[in-house]
């Protein structure tokens, strides 16, 4: 492999990187020879645990910092809030990730959600390989778009028509324009700590990376772009009522994460979603569920199916692209028919609906349709969350947390956590120590207190037990 040098940084390590077919291994579990289907993976118990070293990761990240802002292409990846340098991933399979130093991790980030059936699933890879032979992008309609659209429409209660885009951010941008076009109104209500991608109107009390880095609302966002964005604490229906009363006939939509994953994990209070459905109806405003994270994760029909509340519009992403870049928005036919070229609301995309993303999405959803999927996610995520919380209690830490199906989280705080304000009470310094300790024990958690964790079908009971044992050890040390 050629050696390149950027900004005077020697990249001589490039030639030493393990390739995906490499069988070089410093422990029996570091570089599995199997690389089989996610569901078939059996953990090999290391005879001798490999020493945790990060030299190659550090070299690569130091070089990356000269090449890309902060060394990354998405802020939370940089580990800023948990300290230490990020590890550089070389490959993934099933529930596992391997870094460039040969360390193996049980992964609870799952590429931030898409990997719900396990990383690099054999069937998805095989289907992608076949599709790829026909080309990667047509820039013209293809049958695969129909197939995935039918699957999404059949699954998600609120969606009668769908538009595919390339990311969750794009989906949220599109849905906002559509809500404004349909209602002829400008204002929207969003909730503090909910993240709807990085488009200007949503960068107000935005959770996720903005919360993780403790950033004020981003410079560069024109005042005019956010002047119609009203905010309320999550789970606070009284504030929402006040906003509607003070802005009569002006509010186009209320948008939210029906279960928050971008302030850490926060559940809606039992009546919150119902009350939002009612108040939006009473005021002829649209209710938008941002299901980029919860779609096909809380249940096959998403949070709306799980809670039995049907919004007017829905955004999706992550899982429906099976690990390839994708997003979507959809809803009632009469609203969706406003989207160009059926209607006047313009939105377009060079790579939208490309055959690769459609293929990965179709095969991921097919797997999720198998009986027992969500029961299994519920079971293992419950065991994991309970196990970590009990370990925390035994170690004398004040902790709280929760889970639904394949999504979980915990805080180093007494709780309950119903809002971003509550979440901020968590001891983030302690979380940082916990995160680093878990990493060294071979468990990859989201590098932020303000991000939910994800489980998937590839996580085995052994993975869960191993993770709880690691947590027990780390929680006693911090
Ligand atoms: C709820 C929610 N909406 C929107 C987005 C933005 O999606 P993307 O990162 O694909 O642009 C995210 C990303 O994490 C998300 O969690």
Image (spheres, rainbow, N blue to C red):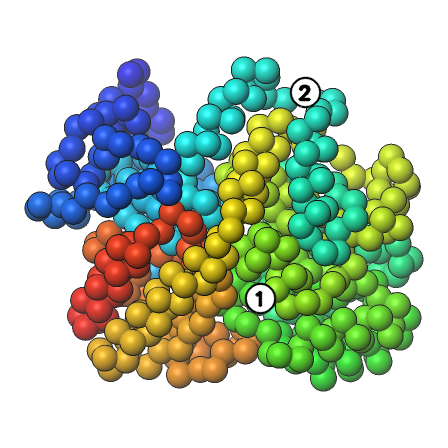
Which quadrant of the figure has residue 87?
A: top left
Q: Residue 227 carries which label?
A: none
Q: Which of 299 and 417 is in front in this view?
A: 299
> Image point 45% across, 45% down: which residue?
117
Q: Nearer the viewer, residue 209 or 45?
A: 45
- Of all residues, the one furthest to the left in this rendering is 48
On screen, 289 above or below 231? Answer: above
> Image point 72% across, 75% down: which residue?
274
Give the SS element for disc 2. Answer: loop
Asked if disc 2 and disc 1 are in contact, CB closer than 8 Å, the reply is no
The number of numbered discs placed on residues in the rendered structure image is: 2
The spot of residue 319 in percent (x, y) is 55, 46
Going by the image, does 211 lie left or right of 389? right
- Placement of the C terminus among the 4 image quadrants: bottom left
> Image point 68% across, 67% down: which residue?
308
Q: Does the residue labelled 1 lie within 8 Å of ligand 1?
A: no
> Image point 48% across, 74% down: which residue?
423
Q: Does the residue labelled 2 lie within 8 Å of ligand 1?
A: no
Residue 74 in view here: no
What residue does disc 1 label? 259
Neighbor class of circle 2 (other Cα within 10 Å; few <14, some 14-19, many 20+) is: some
What residue does disc 2 label? 138
Going by the image, does 29 lie left or right of 379? left
Which quadrant of the figure has residue 206?
A: bottom right
């Amino acid at each position: 492999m050629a050696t390149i040098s950027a900004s005077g940084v020697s990249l001589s390590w490039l030639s030493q990187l393990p390739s995906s077919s490499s069988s070089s291994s410093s422990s029996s579990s570091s570089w599995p020879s199997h690389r089989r289907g996610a569901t078939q993976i059996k953990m090999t118990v290391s005879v001798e645990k490999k020493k945790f070293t990060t030299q190659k990761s550090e070299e690569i990240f130091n070089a990356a910092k000269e090449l890309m802002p902060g060394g990354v292409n998405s802020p939370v990846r940089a580990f800023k809030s948990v300290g230490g340098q990020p590890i550089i991933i070389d490959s993934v399979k099933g529930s596992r990730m391997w870094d460039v130093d040969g360390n193996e991790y049980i992964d609870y980030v799952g590429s931030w959600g898409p990997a719900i059936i396990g990383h690099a699933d054999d069937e998805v890879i095989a289907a992608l390989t076949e599709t790829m032979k026909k080309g990667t992008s047509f820039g013209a309609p293809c049958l695969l778009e129909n197939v995935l659209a039918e699957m999404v429409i059949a699954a998600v209660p609120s969606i009668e028509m769908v538009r595919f885009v390339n990311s969750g951010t794009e989906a949220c941008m599109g849905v906002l324009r559509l809500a404004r076009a349909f209602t002829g109104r400008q204002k929207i209500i969003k909730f503090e700590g909910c993240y709807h991608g990085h488009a200007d109107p949503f960068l107000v009390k935005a959770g996720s990376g903005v919360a993780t880095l403790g950033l004020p609302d981003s410079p560069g966002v024109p005042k005019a772009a956010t002047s119609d964005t009203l905010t309320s604490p999550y789970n606070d229906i009284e504030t929402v009522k006040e906003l509607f009363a003070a802005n009569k006939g002006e509010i186009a939509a209320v948008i939210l994460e029906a279960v928050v994953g971008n302030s850490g994990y926060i559940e809606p209070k039992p009546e919150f979603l119902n009350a939002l459905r009612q108040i939006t109806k009473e005021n002829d405003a649209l209710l938008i569920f941002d299901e980029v994270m919860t779609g096909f994760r809380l249940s096959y029909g998403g949070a709306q199916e799980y809670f039995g509340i049907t919004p007017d519009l829905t955004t999706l992403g992550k899982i429906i692209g099976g690990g390839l870049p994708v997003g979507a928005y959809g809803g009632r036919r009469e609203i969706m028919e406003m989207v160009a070229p059926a209607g006047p609301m313009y939105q377009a995309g060079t790579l939208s609906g490309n055959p690769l993303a459609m293929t990965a999405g179709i095969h991921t959803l097919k797997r999720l349709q198998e009986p027992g999927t969500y029961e299994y996610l519920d079971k293992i995520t419950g065991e994991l969350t309970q196990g970590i919380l009990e370990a925390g209690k035994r170690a004398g830490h004040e902790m709280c947390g929760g889970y639904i199906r394949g999504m979980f989280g915990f805080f180093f705080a007494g709780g309950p956590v119903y809002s971003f304000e509550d979440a901020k009470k968590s001891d983030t310094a302690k979380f940082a120590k916990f995160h680093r300790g878990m990493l060294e024990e071979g468990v990859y958690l989201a590098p932020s207190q303000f991000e939910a964790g994800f489980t998937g079908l590839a996580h085995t009971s052994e993975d869960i037990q191993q993770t709880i044992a690691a947590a027990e050890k780390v929680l006693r040390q911090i």
